[in-house]
Image (cartoon, grey):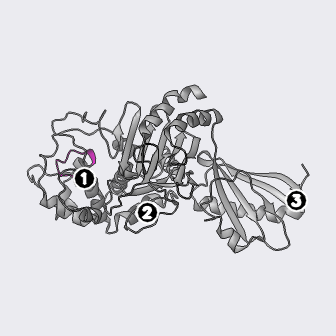
Amino acid sequence: MNRPNLKRYGNVICQTLAMSLLVLASRGYGDGGLQLNILSVLNNQLDIELSSTSNGFNYIFQQTTNLSDTLWNSFGDPIVGDGTAKTCTVVLADTPASYYRVSIEPRTNGVLEHYVDQLVAPTIISNGPGAAILVMNSNDVLLAKGYGYANISTLEPITTNSVFDLASVSKQYTAMGISLLKSQGLIDVTRPLTNYMDDFDDPYPDRPVTVQDLLHHISGLPDYTSDDWEGTPEEFRNLTLESHLTWVNETDEHRRPGIAFEYNNSGYVLLALTIQRITGISFANYLQTNLFGPLAMNQSLVFTNLSQQIPNGVTGYHVEGGTATPSSEPTLVSGDGNIFCSINDFVKYITCLRQNTLISDALKQQAFSNGTFDSGSPIVDEGNGYGYGWSITPLGVEHEGCWSGTSTYIQYNTNNAYAIVVLSNDEDYDCSSLAQSILTNLPTLF
């Protein structure tokens, strides 16, 4: 390796470092150690690697000169990057550098990666849809990788930047929104829902439905995704948070609140509307301003328009007999689902949970705690119970989701510090079984 002439290249190095720090800050990663490695200088080309170990990722920054707009635009968003570059190159020329490119390459454990590769291979069809997988421990990303195709027509591969419909895994984000309101003193979950939504027709004023009843699925209210719904498919697609409330008010309840667990998507739609009513802004804007934005979850969003295009969004499929056919059933209503996210954004969210970035540890523990019936008995119908958008397990919390063209699963373990996310664009993919297979042997791989 040639020793670089720092006088000659020092300005370029400083420019690279300065721009890289700005990008790190814009993405919410400023707390990790930064290291600048001069790899080589040869034929007027300086290879520089700037990395940060923050949150278990290696961040690689690339500066290039004399790159045409047409060629640059083909690379996509320079802030998001394509997640594939492992090295970076600075090409020195007489003209100032005018473009900066950022790529993200998660660090992976080779033994774990090989093990997961073997588990995934028999679960996906050739040239078909697949899955994106994240495995973390308390400090690092152990594996972040995509398998299969985001679009089987274009053979676009699934990457850690691919964006999936989370289906019911969305509920934890809705519940986080409620916890954020609690932290600001704007809501008391033990109070009746009518305190925050006076046009809700409570069927039992003597024992009113509370916000906490909705969180724990013990409200006894009707569920728009069950046989309670008698509307047309078109009405279902166009159901909004407000029109959903009208439907709830006009539909018979199942039972009194507080006496039985019954998983209820309508409850989380009402929670989204509660957030909207309290804050005076849309549910989507509230999550963007208070959750996605502060964590630099730049690929996460709430779906709000039937014609909305999701950047880096995968195409959903149904696989049967070795053949994949497109599957999609977009709807407008949200809170119970309809939040989209990537593996890279999940790293930031899980890190937030680990570090109590947005809410206190006490509020987090409330979200991870089982609910109780009016009798005082704990909820036992959903495994070991149900918290705020999380099913309780012996190891911690988990949730799975499924909708047309998507299957999802997350497990966050509190006693051994592991977390795993599996997102698939095959609606029948068994994400939870794959996750369990990975976690079962995880301690033996290190």
Q: Which residue is mark 1?
A: 225
Query: What residue is pinned by disc 3?
Result: 6
Secondary structure at numbered mark 2:
helix
Q: Which residue is mark 2?
A: 288
For the residue pair 183 and 244, the one nearer the viewer reads as 244
Q: CA distance from mark 2 to mark 1?
A: 26 Å
Residue 339 place in picture, x, y as percent: 40, 57
Considering the numbered disc 1 on the image, is that residue within a helix, a strand or a loop? Answer: loop
Label 3: few (<14), some or many (≥20) within 10 Å? few
Label 1 neighbour load within 10 Å: few <14, some 14-19, many 20+? few
Alpha-carbon span between mark 1 and mark 3? 65 Å
Q: Nearer the viewer, residue 242 or 325?
A: 325
Q: Give the magenta part as a residue range.
A: 215-223
Q: Is residue 186 left or right of residue 153?
A: left
Q: Nearer the viewer, mark 2 or mark 1?
A: 1
Dot 3: element: helix
Under mark 1, the amino acid is Thr
